[in-house]
Amino acid sequence: MISKLLLSAVMLMTLAPSASVAQEVTAEVRTWSGQTLIVKDPTLEIFYTILPSVTSPLGGGGGGYSPTAPGAPTPPGTSGEIAQPPATIGVGSVGFQAGTAMQAAAGTLLPAGPVSKQGRRQQDFVRLSREGAEVAVPFANIVNLLFTKTLVHPRGLPPYVSQKHYRHAATAVLVDGSKIDGDYVNLGTALLRGATPQGTIDIPWEEIESLRFRR
């Protein structure tokens, strides 16, 4: 099974469509709640947060976002970025409130530190795992993508929290008719972004049951 999955990964390189051929792409999205949406020019996008460098209270250079300074954040797209969902953009304000409480307790006013930076980038691959082997399936080569989910109960968590934890798997059908089954998939903070007659829409991948592309 693993060798079959790895062979499919090699074959994917021959399936990539030519960038010189412009074609309109739409996706039919079915959500777990039963909604069906048609989006134009769908893309898979990842949201991330870049943490600023922290100035040592004992002295040293100032903080900032310089990629060459020691302790500075890694530029987007590298292993140094920290994924965050878009709902956590206000994480800086939460930190400020906590800092304000500490200042009030100490009776002093401390200078505000630099805030984190939010960003997003397109994800060109969907990574599927099967029996420990992982294959990166080009997003542009997928015709159908069907997700399944199983409720899991992590130990040590109260019932109202554990009932929200799912393990996801996915099956991808490619443009050449071949199929790749993954027993595990986790797209992190990925959203499916596309255009509708009402405007741009972002759909968290965990809310999607199936995708059907028309190219």
Image: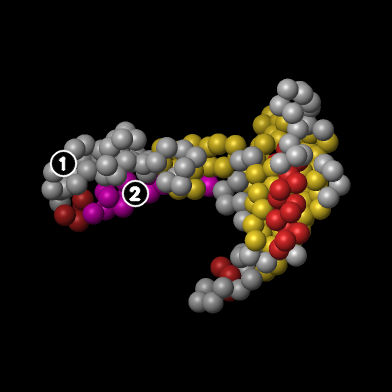
Q: Secondary structure at mark 1?
A: loop
170 or 166: nearer the eye?
170
Dominant secondary structure, magenta: helix
For the N terminus, the image quarter is: bottom right
Q: Is residue 38 above or below residue 188?
A: above
* Amino acid type, callout 2: Gly
115 or 143: nearer the eye?
143
Residue denoted by label 2: 95
Q: Position of residue 100 (x, y in %)?
A: 26, 49
At 71% from the left and 41% from the top, the residue drawn is: 13
Depth check, mark 1 against mark 2: the one in front is: 1
* Amino acid type, callout 1: Gly
Q: Is residue 212 visible?
A: no
* Range of magenta residues: 85-102
Which numbered tag is attached to residue 115? Answer: none
Q: Position of residue 33 (x, y in %)?
A: 75, 54
At 73% from the left and 22% from the top, the residue drawn is: 20
Residue denoted by label 1: 60
Q: Is residue 164 left or right of residue 158?
A: right
Furthest residue toward left: 58
52 or 128: nearer the eye?
128
Residue 103 highlighted magenta (yes or no): no
Q: Secondary structure at mark 2?
A: helix
